[in-house]
Amino acid sequence: MTTMTLLGAFDIITPDPGLFIWTVLVFLILLWLLNKFAFGPIKDALKKREEGIADALHQAQKAREEMANMKADNEKILNEAREERSRMLREAKDAKDQIITEAREKANAEYNRIVDEAKGAINNQKMAALIEIKNNVGNMVLEVSEKILRRELDNKADQEQYIKQLVDEIKVK
């Protein structure tokens, strides 16, 4: 048998209805099998992968939003910390200025007290010195007067003359 005799009955251009039905039937069965065992799991895997990617994108977007919120919170906290630091520095400076002012006032008050005490002591010493000088002068006057009176009382003629001279001086003035 030659190849021609086997193929001689086979004509490509004219289809055989039995072969056509079997071919369509095999194709439909193969399509159903592929759909059930190949395309279904592939579709499910693709769907799960798509859901996983969508979930990952959603999580990434959520993480970005959280990062943005955290960044905003960090900036807010940083600004609050800066303001707190500035406030604390102002308070420390005010406290320092107040302490310096109080120290100056206390030093001035102490200075004035010491100066007043020194002036009082100087005045007391001055008065004591003046009293001592007056006492000394008084004693010297008494001694001189006593010596003059002794001399004067010794000579009665000189004493009378001296009294007349004092009277004349009093009238002259």
Image: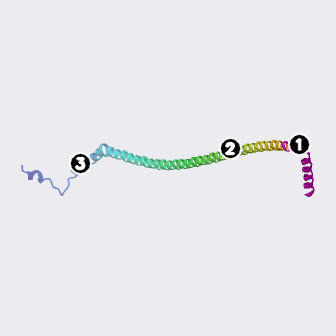
Judging by the rendered image, the residue that carries numbered circle 2 is 110
Please check the rendered image and state whether residue 9 is part of the magenta-colored stretch, yes or no: no
Among the two numbered marks 2 and 1 on one chain, the one whose residue lies closer to the N terminus: 2
Q: Residue at x 91, y 58 (%)?
A: 172
Q: x, y percentage for residue 50?
A: 37, 48
Label 1 sits on a secondary structure element that is helix
Q: Considering the image in quadrants, where does the C terminus appear?
A: bottom right
Mark 2–mark 3 Cα distance, whole angstroms, equals 126 Å
Q: Which amino acid lies under the numbered mark 2 shown in the image of this protein?
A: Glu
Please say whether residue 162 is one of the residues in the magenta stretch: yes
Judging depth in this view, the residue of 164 and 94 nearest the camera is 164
As helix, strand or loop, the secondary structure at mark 3 comes to helix
* Tag 3: amino acid: Trp
Q: Give the range drawn in magenta.
A: 146-173
Mark in the foreground, 3 or 1: 1
Camera-nearest label, 2 or 1 = 1
Q: What residue type is disc 1 on?
A: Asp
Badge 1 density bin: few <14, some 14–19, many ≥20, Cα 10 Å: few
Give the number of the disc on residue 22. 3
Q: Considering only order in the chain, which callout, 3 or 2, is on the residue closer to the N terminus?
A: 3
Which residue is at the front of the view, 79 or 66?
79
The circle on residue 54 is none
Answer few, some or many: residues within 10 Å of disc 3's Cα (few below 14, many 20 plus, some between 14 and 19): few
Residue under numbered circle 1:
154
In this image, 83 relative to 35: left or right?
right
- Asked whether 165 or 155 is in front, the reply is 155
Left or right? Give the position of 146 relative to 94.
right
Determine the secondary structure under disc 2: helix
At 63% from the left and 45% from the top, the residue drawn is 99
Residue 8 spot, x, y in % from top left: 11, 54
Nearest to viewer (mark 2 / mark 3): 2
